[in-house]
Image (spheres, rainbow, N blue to C red):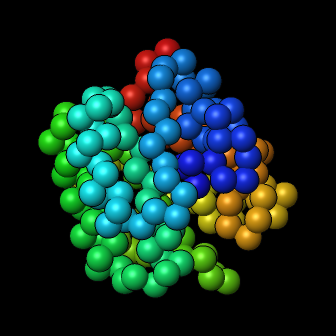
Amino acid sequence: MTFGIGANSQTESYPAVLQQLIGRTVINAGIPGEISQQGLLRLPMILEQTKPDLVVLCHGGNDLIRQLGNEQLKDNLEKMIRLIQKSGAEVLLIAVPRFSITLALPDLYTELATAYQLPIELTILPELERTSAMKSDTIHPNSMGYKVLAERIHKLIFSAGGIIK
């Protein structure tokens, strides 16, 4: 979802819209189809190259679709969180639902947010997945969905004290 499949990734992905909302550089490091293990392997290089102040960690959808297991996903996300924090950046976690009829969130997201005291967004992705007008296909948001996602992330960053007006 971070890459922006289903919309113009350069102008309508949620990182592009978020950059407009916050007036700061937002780097889109999303890779379509990536599983958390691959993201974990890429993360050190991304952190070294970009030196971010904040990382919006929205990962796990492809693990869940491929049924790779909650323990592997949780372990990979936990390692990502530790790497990000070790780099000096803050982490904002976006919970990804299981792509099933219930769109339930795996407990691992709230467990990680609690353990690492992270701001977390729990409701936006299930809301988008339930709203066909916000989707470009069965999984990915369209430009309107990405805009709503960016607005929700902006609100969470602001409420967590990450942006001062």
**Residue 124, percent from left and from top:** 60, 56
Count the numbered circles shown: 0
Q: Nearer the viewer, residue 128 or 80?
A: 80
Q: Is residue 155 left or right of residue 74?
A: right
Residue at 56%, 37% in the rendered image = 15
| Residue 131 location, quadrant | bottom right
Q: Nearer the viewer, residue 89 or 113?
A: 89
**Residue 117, percent from left and from top:** 26, 50
Q: Nearer the viewer, residue 61 or 147?
A: 61
**Residue 21, percent from left and from top:** 60, 25
In which quadrant is the N terminus drawn? bottom right
Q: Is residue 65 left or right of residue 113?
A: right
Name the outermost residue toward the top: 165
| Residue 85 location, quadrant | top left
Residue at 63%, 48% in the rendered image = 4
**Residue 151, percent from left and from top:** 63, 38
Q: Is residue 77 left or right of residue 30?
A: left
Name the outermost residue toward the left: 86
Residue at 72%, 41% in the rendered image = 8
Q: Is residue 65 left or right of residue 60?
A: right
Q: Is residue 135 above or below residue 9?
A: below
Instruction: Kindly tell me whether residue 145 is visible in this rendering.
Output: yes
| Residue 111 location, quadrant | bottom left
Instruction: Kindly tell me whether residue 112 is visible in this rendering.
Output: no
Residue at 67%, 46% in the rendered image = 146
